[in-house]
Image (spheres, rainbow, N blue to C red):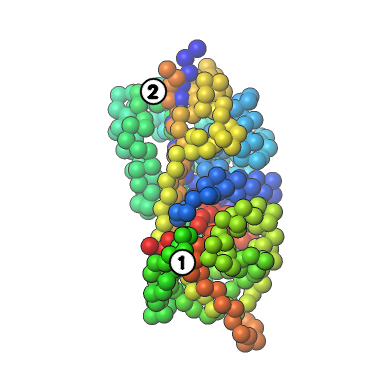
Amino acid sequence: MKRLLLPILVAAALPAADSHIMPSMNAFTIACYKQFTGGDGNLILSPFNIATALSMALGGARGRTAEEIQSVLELHYDSTYDAALGALLDGLAKAGNGGGNELHTANGLWVQKGFAIQPAFESTLANDYHAPFNPLDFIANPEAARSRINRWTEEQTKEKIKDLLPAGSLNAQTRLVLTSAIYFYGQWQDPFSTSRTQPAPFTLPDGGTTEANFMNQTAHFGYGETPSAQILEMRYAGTGIAFDVLLPKTPAGLPSLEKSLTSENLKGWLGSLTVRNVEVSLPKFRAESGFSLRQTLSTMGMPAAFSDRADFSGIDPQRRLAISAVVHKAFVDVAERGTEAAAATGVTMHSLAMRMPEQPVVFRADHPFLFLIRDTGTGVAFFIGRLTNPR
């Protein structure tokens, strides 16, 4: 039987309201991040975004394909999952907007004209993910379709995520694309004064140094320590969203910190923070990352979705669909006023064929560190990454 590999594009972010979704999301965040440790370059990604994209595809998966996707996402999929995830997205968006901040998510369903999909799948995406049905002609003009989807992604991410789908990624065998996008802009609750930003050396992974522009201030922040790291939490005004920095106590300590990173450890570390007077020096930085995730996700445990054994009969009863590629792009910009971040994921399927004054703690992030952007109310992490070179 001929099978189809269909494109599903996705970029996402979620608010967490459901207790059985949040632990799964954060477990996947850590597992996904660990697939990219071992390098010495900057990294930014949104596993939460990737998980949302895969969740949309999961709604149409059956049999072993569904079991493997659930295993990789570390969740149990039932009849309540999509609605709970949709409520999470809606709740996060409401909580993340205000005080000059913006948190925006959007989803879309792009289908080849004339290609029939299961009404239940279309209804789930429309009602729970707010992903409207958009017909495109991949057969006659795949490049025009790619341009339309990429433009949609750019619009939803304030032009931060461009060319999500590379040239040639869609063709006449493309039948379906799912898209999801997330954009965040947060103003610091305690902004840095630009007049205090000063150049200083930043130690690189190889022991060399480069000059970076360090933002400086002394104020009260969430602070904690482990035997090997300092942890700083800076809030965004008017929201429960925070920027967490996990700074190794030695310049060469990032690999060891990454090895010790588990969802349980992270929960314990962040749960033990206390408000302290902290003298902060943090480099301004901007980072972008792009990945092809097909091999990564297969290694994590969902190879069937990419093979001729794929079962997406919840979308197409004739079982002609399989995932051909998963791509992900993310962006972050940290400056004196706040943080801007965005992410998008694409999955393509083709046809087969107040306190007393105190001595401040010094937190000088002048060597490689790990960071997260997360919702402190639910614990859900939107973005995770590392900075090894602010230049």
Q: Going by the image, does 158 lie left or right of 381?
A: left
Q: Residue at x 56, y 56 (%)?
A: 255
Residue 203 image position (x, y, % from top left): 46, 66
> From the viewer's perspective, is the residue at label 2 or at label 1 nearer?
1
Q: Residue at x 41, y 57 (%)?
A: 287
Residue type beneath disc 2: Gln
| Callout 2–callout 1 Cβ contact below 8 Å | no
- Mark-to-mark CA distance, 2 and 1: 49 Å
Q: Going by the image, does 204 lie left or right of 314?
A: left
Residue 220 image position (x, y, % from top left): 58, 77
Q: Going by the image, does 197 lie left or right of 24?
A: left
Q: Nearer the viewer, residue 273 or 247?
A: 247
Which quarter of the rendered picture does the C terminus lie within? bottom left
Q: Nearer the viewer, residue 139 or 28?
A: 28
Chain-order first, disc 2 or disc 1: 2
**Label 2, on which residue?**
173
Residue 360, relative to residue 298: is it above or below? below
Q: Residue at x 35, y 23 (%)?
A: 172
**Label 1, on which residue?**
203
Q: Can residue 203 be seen by looking at this rendering?
A: yes
Q: Nearer the viewer, residue 113 or 343?
A: 343
